[in-house]
């Protein structure tokens, strides 16, 4: 069983819809990363959080440490948001290693 | 500021050939790592380095070799390519230390082994 689980695997929505992608993890973590992988393949770091909530533009990331759960929200979704969104957990045990989820493929239809 | 630069972007090899995937960063990051990405699986760590002269194995190190002679460069060597090594390879870097730091990824190398 993967230590980091994402849901849904695939998500298709209409432009303007509110999007939620979920990430659950079973390991003790020091931080949770959200990444975006563009259709061309490049990976960009969106957020890194260890508690609470972070916001950047239309993107919001939250984490609940007690429940070992994080969510990525996209408000007013746009076709350019179409990408694979990946969460990754950084171990709490002093090393730099990340454990990655398998990603959520988001498609926003105009 | 180029960030993390990977070369080549695409490569086709025959079984048994060797090659080196190059990775360079210009951000003075201590931590560098190599991942492979396969369909239906999350990125998996191959090797990583916490500084020049220091390397360690990740989750899937077999068939790969690395070295870190400078802070900037972290090449990944395939010793004798096998079809199971067909994958997309990503190099990443970040600052190390006590505080969590965001990862910076290269654009990836798509490798096919025939």
Image (spheres, coloured by chain):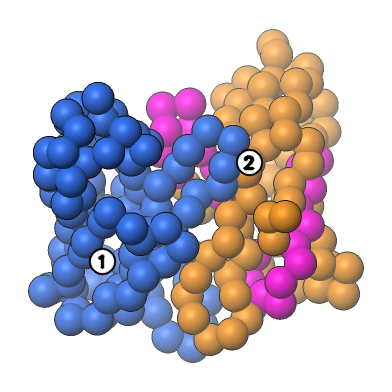
Chain colours: A orange, B blue
Q: Chain of mark 1?
A: B
Under circle 2, the secondary element is loop
Residue located at (69% from left, 61% from top): A3
Residue B35's mark? none
Q: Quadrant of residue A63?
A: bottom right
B40 with respect to B25 (left or right): right
**Chain identity of mark 2:** A
In front here: A54 or A48? Answer: A48
| Residue plotted at (72% across, 55% down) | A1
Q: From mark 1 to mark 2, how far is it between C-alphas?
A: 27 Å
Q: Is residue B34 above or below residue A78?
A: below
Q: Is residue B17 visible?
A: yes
Quarter of the C terminus of chain A within the rendering: top right
Do the CB atoms of the residues marked 1 and 2 lie less than 8 Å apart? no
**Residue B107 makes an appearance in the image:** no
Q: Which residue is mark 2?
A: A103
Residue at point 42%, 58% (across, down): B60
Q: Label 2: few (<14), some or many (≥20) within 10 Å?
A: many
For the point 71% across and 77% down, which residue is it?
A28
* Predominant SS along the magenta part: strand
Q: Which residues are magenta?
A: A20-43
Residue A7 in the image, given as x and y percentages of width and height: 78, 41
Q: Which residue is mark 1?
A: B27
């Amino acid at each position: 069983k993967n230590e980091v689980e994402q849901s849904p695997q695939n998500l298709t929505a209409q432009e303007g819809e509110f999007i939620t992608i979920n990430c659950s993890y079973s390991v003790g973590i020091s931080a949770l990363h959200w990444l975006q992988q563009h259709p061309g393949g490049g990976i960009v770091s969106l957020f890194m959080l260890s508690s609470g909530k972070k916001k950047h533009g239309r993107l919001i990331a939250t984490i609940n440490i007690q429940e070992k759960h994080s969510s990525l929200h996209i408000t007013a979704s746009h076709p350019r948001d179409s990408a694979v969104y990946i969460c990754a957990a950084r171990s709490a045990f002093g090393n730099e290693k990340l454990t990655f989820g398998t990603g959520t493929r988001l498609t926003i239809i105009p | 500021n180029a960030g993390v630069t990977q070369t080549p972007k695409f490569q086709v090899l025959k079984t048994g050939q060797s090659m080196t995937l190059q990775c360079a960063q210009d951000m003075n990051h201590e931590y560098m790592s190599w991942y492979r990405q396969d369909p239906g699986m999350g990125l998996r760590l191959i090797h990583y380095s916490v500084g020049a002269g220091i390397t360690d194995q990740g989750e899937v190190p077999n068939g790969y070799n690395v070295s870190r002679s400078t802070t900037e460069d972290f090449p990944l060597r395939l010793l004798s390519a096998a079809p199971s090594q067909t994958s997309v390879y990503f190099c990443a870097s970040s600052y190390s230390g006590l505080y969590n730091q965001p990862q910076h990824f290269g654009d990836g190398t798509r490798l096919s082994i025939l």
